[in-house]
């Protein structure tokens, strides 16, 4: 039981707490009134003060691939040097349980090897019965290119430096002199490249014919000057790895038709250049990336034009739907048919919205949607077809860089050599082969008889 003294003590403590609570409430009321008065006198911040941005939610860090969660992979050693330890370095006692405690690899290259010059001496003798001189026969097929003095290893190296590494002729000349002590003239290097291209002409023709038979072919073109005159390098690229290039003076559609051949029945993927409008054969897919790039430029050019911004967003929404359909698994073509019809109606509606409005900023792209509405949806109906022309854009980029470095070629034969060597090297690279080894293997085969 609670005694009267304890009860009196609790009552006194309760009275003190009630008094403190009342004082705290009065202080809180005074503080709130003071805050309200200060807020009323508060002036807006200057214009140069940026508004507070809400804190972003922490992003989840993407997990690395399991192959990256380990130390650097060791190279296969070509030489092993073991550093022995038999006695204790402190007290000189003999050590037990000796084993390899740590490894360290040093990767280096051997010093450059000088060229090997092999002199073939053919004996010659006089036959008294035949009354004529006879000379020992010499067969250097697979060792040297044609009647030249340079072997196939030098020829393959020069072709690799020129085509894959895109070195100028004089840089190749300096490379051979500095690293291998081989002195060659510029004309000899050019002639060697022409000989390699002639040796690979049959292989290039096979690459072109194989590309024409593929179900999906990408095409693109870029300028290529020849003897100071403008021209164009036309490219065919396939998902299977074929890369074929030809140089023509014209950029007309007849060149694209001849490049594909009359028997082409696959799907052609290109940009919106008019030279591809009347190509033969099967279906066509126009590049969505080119269209999206122009849509982005249109939106940036008219940031305050609500009608333009709305139209651009609607076209981008169509592509977003195409992307989602490409990422989802497809069970049959019948499932894609309703989607193609719906997207076709949307593109036709968006194109017709401004195709007749001559002064509207959306008219050029609206006309593009209206004119190519069928050729923008082939990727939805055929899962083998990508929505972009990225394969051709990436394949033709090395030619663009080579053109900027060298400025083009000086003759028709130089252009033919450049296109032939690039077709070979680009095809080998995409298909996972080493161009240097492939050039050497190509030159070891007998010269094709035309």
Image (cartoon, rainbow, N blue to C red):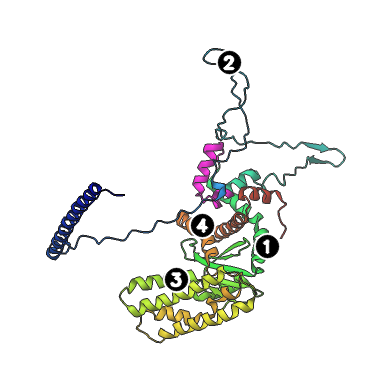
Above or below, 144 against 315 in this view is above
Mark nearest the camera among 2 and 3 is 2
Q: Is residue 319 left or right of residue 328?
A: left
Q: Which residue is mark 2?
A: 87
3D distance between C-alphas at marks 4 and 3: 24 Å
Residue that lies at the very extreme toward the bottom in this rendered image: 356
The range drawn in magenta is: 159-183
3D distance between C-alphas at marks 1 and 2: 68 Å
Asked if residue 270 can be seen in this view, the reply is: no
Q: Position of residue 258 (x, y in %)?
A: 60, 72
3D distance between C-alphas at marks 2 and 3: 73 Å
Q: Which residue is mark 3?
A: 292
Tag of residue 206: 1
Mark 3, other Cα within 10 Å: few <14 / some 14–19 / many ≥20:
some
Between 196 and 431, which is closer to the camera in this rendering?
Answer: 431
Please tell me whether the stretch drawn in magenta is mainly helix, strand or loop: helix
Mark nearest the camera among 1 and 3 is 3
3D distance between C-alphas at marks 4 and 1: 22 Å
Q: Which residue is mark 4?
A: 398
3D distance between C-alphas at marks 4 and 2: 60 Å
Q: The residue tagged with tag 1: helix, strand or loop?
A: helix
Mark nearest the camera among 4 and 2 is 2
Mark 2, other Cα within 10 Å: few <14 / some 14–19 / many ≥20:
few
Indicate which disc, 4 or 2, sits on the residue closer to the N terminus. Answer: 2
Q: The residue tagged with tag 3: helix, strand or loop?
A: helix
Magenta-drawn stretch contains 282: no
Magenta-drawn stretch contains 182: yes
Mark 4, other Cα within 10 Å: few <14 / some 14–19 / many ≥20:
some
């Amino acid at each position: 039981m609670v005694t009267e003294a304890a009860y009196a003590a609790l009552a006194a403590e309760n009275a003190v707490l009630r008094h403190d609570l009342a004082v705290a409430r009065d202080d809180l009321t005074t503080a709130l009134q003071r805050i309200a008065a200060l807020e009323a006198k508060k002036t807006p911040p200057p214009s140069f003060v940026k508004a507070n941005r809400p804190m972003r939610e922490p992003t989840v860090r993407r997990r690395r691939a399991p192959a990256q969660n380990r130390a650097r992979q060791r190279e296969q050693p070509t030489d092993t040097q073991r550093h022995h330890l038999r006695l204790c370095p402190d007290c000189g006692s003999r050590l037990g349980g000796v084993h390899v405690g740590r490894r360290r690899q040093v990767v280096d290259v051997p010093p450059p090897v000088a060229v090997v010059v092999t002199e073939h001496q053919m004996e010659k003798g006089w036959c008294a019965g035949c009354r004529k001189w006879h000379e020992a026969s010499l067969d250097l097929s697979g060792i040297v290119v044609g009647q030249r003095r340079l072997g196939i290893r030098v020829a393959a190296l020069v072709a690799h430096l020129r085509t894959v590494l895109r070195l100028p002729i004089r840089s190749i000349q300096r490379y051979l002199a500095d690293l291998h002590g081989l002195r060659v003239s510029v004309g000899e290097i050019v002639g060697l490249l022409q000989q390699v291209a002639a040796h690979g002409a049959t292989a290039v023709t096979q690459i072109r014919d194989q590309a024409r038979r593929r179900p999906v072919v990408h095409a693109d073109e870029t300028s290529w000057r020849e003897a100071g005159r403008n021209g164009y390098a036309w490219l065919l690229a396939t998902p299977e790895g074929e890369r074929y290039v030809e140089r023509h003076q014209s950029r007309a559609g007849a060149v694209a038709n001849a490049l594909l051949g009359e028997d082409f029945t696959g799907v052609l993927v290109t940009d919106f250049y008019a030279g591809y409008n009347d190509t033969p054969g099967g279906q066509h897919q126009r590049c969505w990336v080119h269209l999206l790039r122009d849509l982005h430029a249109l939106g940036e050019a008219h940031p305050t034009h609500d009608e333009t911004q709305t139209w651009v967003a609607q076209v981008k929404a169509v592509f977003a739907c195409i992307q989602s359909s490409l990422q989802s698994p497809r069970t049959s073509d019948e499932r894609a048919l309703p989607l193609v019809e719906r997207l076709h109606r949307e593109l036709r509606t968006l194109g017709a919205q401004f195709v007749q409005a001559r002064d509207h900023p959306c008219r050029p792209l609206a006309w593009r949607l209206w004119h190519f509405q069928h050729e923008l949806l082939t990727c939805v109906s055929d899962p083998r077809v990508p929505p972009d022309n990225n394969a051709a854009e990436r394949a033709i980029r090395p030619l663009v860089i080579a053109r900027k470095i060298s400025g083009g070629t000086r003759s028709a034969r130089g252009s033919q050599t450049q296109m032939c060597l690039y077709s070979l090297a680009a095809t080998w690279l995409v298909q996972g082969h080493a161009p240097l080894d492939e050039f050497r293997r190509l030159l070891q085969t007998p010269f094709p008889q035309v």
